[in-house]
Image (cartoon, rainbow, N blue to C red):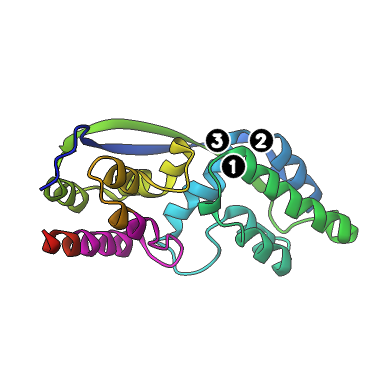
Amino acid sequence: MNVAETPFEFVTVSYLTRIGNQSAGTLAELLTGLEHCSDASIFHHTFQTLGSHHFLTDGFSNDFAQWALSDTNRNDLAEQLAALDIRDYVSIAALRSDLCRVVGEYCAAYPNFASQSALERFYFCESVELTAPLGRNARTLDEFREGIEHLSHSGFYFHFISSRLRLQLRTNDFSHWLADGLGLKSLAESVNHIDIYTNTLDSARAKLLRLIDRERRKA
């Protein structure tokens, strides 16, 4: 059995939501807000809400897209915003740039819609991330599996979804450690291919555990 030199350290995480000073009542104001809001706000309305979306039954996982649909009735813009896949981004700056591009191009193409008042204002919020060691680590695949099984939803989200911003790689904490720590590159790739949009946090975890079990049977 492979034993990693550097253990995987599981963490627990909490997110505090803070309402910012900016809001938008039109698409033009949304564009201005996107250009000037904090990185923490972009994170909150895209990466962070994806975790919350897993417990909902409808709507878009992107807050900007959801507002464009429900409060400005611009379904075409909403679909364009929702099509921005956060798995493609390793920095908030790149995601902000594409959000601004999509909204900016739409406002330029439809100036009447750009200045039309929304049903409800959009309030820019921020996520404040608080992490702490869980007191559990893993050096083997068996220990890793046990840790995954007992990880909270927020901890799983932190390691599996938001970690790509911290790593600045198109991967996640789990895959990164499986490849670099245990040398299980094929397993790491399979884990990274678990779809974070079509799976809930629970079903993503279940798929991850099945992949690990399949790897363990090879030993």
Residue found 22% across the figure and 44% down from its top: 182
Can residue 73 be seen from the camera position used here? no
Q: Who is closer to the viewer here, 190 or 196?
A: 190
Tell me which corner region of the image, top left, top right, bottom left or bottom right, holds residue 108. Answer: bottom right
At label 3, the amino acid type is Ala
At label 1, the amino acid type is Ile
Percent of width and height locating residue 176: 34, 44
Q: Which residues are magenta?
A: 189-212
The Cα–Cα distance between marks 3 and 1, rounded to whole angstroms, is: 6 Å
Task: Provide the secondary structure element on which disc 3 rests.
Answer: helix
At label 2, the amino acid type is Cys
Task: Provide the secondary structure element on which disc 2 rests.
Answer: loop
Q: Who is closer to the viewer here, 80 or 68?
A: 80
According to the image, label 1 marks what residue?
Answer: 42
Residue found 33% across the figure and 38% down from its top: 13
Can residue 62 be seen from the camera position used here? yes
Against 119, is 36 above or below?
Answer: above
Q: Verify CB contact (< 8 Å) between mark 3 and mark 1.
A: yes
Q: Verify CB contact (< 8 Å) between mark 1 and mark 2.
A: yes
The Cα–Cα distance between marks 1 and 2, rounded to whole angstroms, is: 7 Å
According to the image, label 2 marks what residue?
Answer: 37
The local crowd at label 2, few if under 14, some if 14 to 19, many if 20 or more residues have their Cα within 10 Å, is some
